[in-house]
Image (cartoon, grey):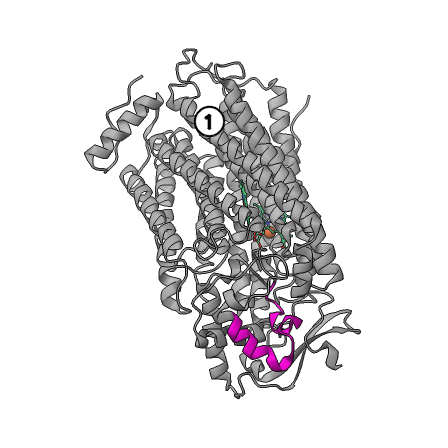
Amino acid sequence: MSANSETATPTPSSLKAKLQAFHSWAGVDDSTLNNGQKLAVKYFMGAVILFIFQILFGLLAGLQFIAPGFLYDILDFSVNRMVHINAMILWMLYGFIGCTYWLLEDESGTEIAGLKFGILGFWVFSAAITVVVLVYLLVQTGAGNDTTLWLINEGREYIEAPRWADIGIVIVMLIFFYNVVMTFSKGKWSGIAGVLTLDLVALAGLYVAGMFYMTNITHEQFWWWWVIHLWVEATWEVLVGVIMAWSLMTILGVSRKIVTTWLYIEVALMFGSGILGLGHHYFWIGTPEYWLTIGGFFSALEPIPLVAMVVHAVYDSGERGFKNMNHPAMAWLIAHAFGNFFGAGVWGFMHTLPQINLYTHGTQWSASHGHLAFFGAYATINIAFFYIAIQHWRGNVWMGAESQNAWRWKWALALLNIGVLGMTIALLIAGYEQSFIERAIEGSTWGGYFAAQTHPSFLSAMHWRMLFGWITAAGLGLLVWDLLTIGKGETRKAEVITQTE
Amino acid sequence: MSETPMWASESFWKKMAVWVTAGSFLILVVLTFDTLKQTTAGGERVPAYSVINKKIDYQYDEALHKFMPVIGGEELLFGKVFSEEEAEQLVTLGKKTTQAKNCMNCHTLLGNGAYYAPDLTKAWLDQGWLTVELREEQMIKFLMDPEKNARTFGTGRKMPNLDITEEEAKGVIAFLKWMSSIDTNGFPYNFTTIYAEDD
Ligand code: HEM
Ligand code: HEM
Ligand SMILES: [Fe+2]
């Protein structure tokens, strides 16, 4: 397999040559991809690189719990943690943009409308991220004024990116959005296309809610949660619903009518519970008491669509005897259905009623849930898509459980899932201990905080988290190796799946 | 003969999706207006910035069955009376400093943020500052040079030196004092303040 000579990028020719050499080494073939998919694989590669960054900085932050002197005053916990979670948000967004570009031409039945802009958007976005991360690492903090918030760091968890980058992100999202809408308009609309487009409007629009400075911290956190919660518990959930629908249709051959109906059900249930479920973050930030009732009630309903999703994915797979043309992708899709249900649904539900949240709020409990939810719901489905993409890119070869070197994807799957689950349990134990000792007994004073942090069960939990962190990192290493090599030298073609009516 | 019932059809769920989403969003928008109005600084839940001129405490309210901020008489910050405008300016400097120094990626504020360092919601009231008389000076010293003034309570975790100036430190303290006066529906529960011995 030779690399295609036409990589439509505006990069200098030496870089182009290197890229081609890489392509031929990796055994990928651009000619098997449509233009939207060529753009998608750029995003996927960016996503994998950012995923590696996420884990590296997670390891550093985790180590600092055990050895606080490690990198003190050089790369402090705050810096490592910020890069850890920012890289996570960004790699997932890269993945989602990639997935959308991947299915765009197939779903619309026409060529992508603004390919040149799309490519430009990718490079601008990537360059901006590089600058932002370098500033995070080298400058870190600034004086308490607007210049810092505009140029260095906005200091708001998850959306720390300085204001100039916020504006850049919005512009890139507009280009992306233009491409999606224009392509569907030029070609044909479908249920999936409609949900996808409206969801992307909401997703991009919500980001703007996080772009203002406010001295009143109650107002500030009110809007901050609009971005964070309404992303992960509303718009991102629906986006992965779209991706799941499309994937089940293409790799399993489920009929369009069935996946579209399920998608509408999920939208109704997810938005119906998730939008007002926002209230579970408005218990203790100064907002009125009615949020205790509204937030508690609606967020308690949020697991319902996630159960529906599991039923949908498992039933449709089971009905086809799990016969599919991409075993690793299928496995990760099933991991997604369960991970979303457990991480978001079960772990979220456990601390979502205000009577419990009064004690668990702001403890390692939240971190336990955060890890399982982000991994289970969003890392998994992106990884599934990486496998779908690499299969096509390697010329649509067979990727099964008995293929050569299949141990790699199986072990990557096992290590990543065991690693994150192990960290989740360790953090849960730490969270319970904090809830009891720091919150319930000691009343959340500083003395109480430190009493909980030095308790033997907390200390051992931090060591277990680290051990499982290393397992997670090993899983990621294996995953990257597998993506670089899976299907290389495989000659059997994947069979063509026919969609049922 | 069999057919798909209406409630299982694609068109039914499409309509449901649209109406449920629009309805929920509409309710959220209405509640947002109400919440923003009720939580404007100067209202009952979120006091005016000039509350930094007063004594703030946090106690269990028998009637309401929850912990509530208790705003008392004059207790000046840095020995000065701040006008509403001056107070807002100082709290603003403090708030911007907390963002510029990335406090939230080690600490929690109102319980949100990171879990590497203690919650700051009621930091102003914490017994960690030893006595009411020593508090301001202790806080300034600590913020400006945490490395030397840290008490790590056996964790070894020290706050890094963030190049906080004296002016910024005063801003942060004003911000923390003001934040401790917000009615947070009883979070944190069972907190003992620095004034506890006086009562
Ligand atoms: C995939 C979906 C979800 C993701 C990615 C997610 C992620 C997170 C993260 C990262 C936090 C911590 C935020 C912080 O840093 O302060 C959080 C908080 C929280 N989540 Fe979720 N979540 C999801 C779904 C859910 C669901 C469905 C529920 C409820 C049924 C839920 C309930 C909560 C609650 C109550 C908190 C507040 C914790 C606290 O008080 O400290 N989450 N979520
Ligand atoms: C090597 C593996 C990892 C290690 C050692 C690690 C470590 C950490 C540490 C130390 C924190 C800070 C918690 C605190 O403030 O006390 C953190 C936060 C976080 N990490 Fe990880 N992490 C790892 C992998 C992951 C993965 C795979 C995900 C999701 C895909 C993830 C998502 C998050 C999230 C969402 C938070 C913020 C949680 C919150 O604020 O409640 N991490 N991580
Ligand atoms: Fe939430």
In-front residue for pair B68/B80: B80
- Quarter of the image with the C terminus of chain A in it: top right
Q: Position of residue A112 (x, y in %)?
A: 33, 34
* CB at disc 1 and ligand 2 closer than 8 Å: no
Instruction: Residue at 43%, 55% (x, y): give it.
Output: A74
- Report the predominant secondary structure element of the magenta stretch: helix
Q: Position of residue A123 (x, y in %)?
A: 30, 42
Residues in magenta, as a range: B119-142
- 10 Å crowding of disc 1: few (<14), some (14-19), many (20+): many
Q: Chain of mark 1?
A: A
Q: Amino acid at mark 1?
A: Tyr
Instruction: Residue at 41%, 55% (x, y): give it.
Output: A161
Residue under circle 1? A387
Q: How many marks?
A: 1
In-front residue for pair A15/A419: A419
Residue B137 found in image quarter? bottom right
Residue A376 found in image quarter? top right
In-front residue for pair A325/A132: A132
Asked if residue A349 can be seen in this view, the reply is no
Q: Position of residue A277 (x, y in %)?
A: 63, 53
Residue B133 on the magenta span: yes
- Determine whether the residue tagged by mark 1 lies in a helix, strand or loop: helix
Is residue A256 found left or right of A152 in the rendered image?
Answer: right
Is residue A232 found left or right of A112 in the rendered image?
Answer: right
Residue A476 on the magenta span: no
Extreme residue toward the right, this view: B62
Extreme residue toward the left, this view: A13
Asked if residue B183 can be seen in this view, the reply is yes
Q: Position of residue A253 (x, y in %)?
A: 52, 21
- Quarter of the image with the N terminus of chain A in it: top left
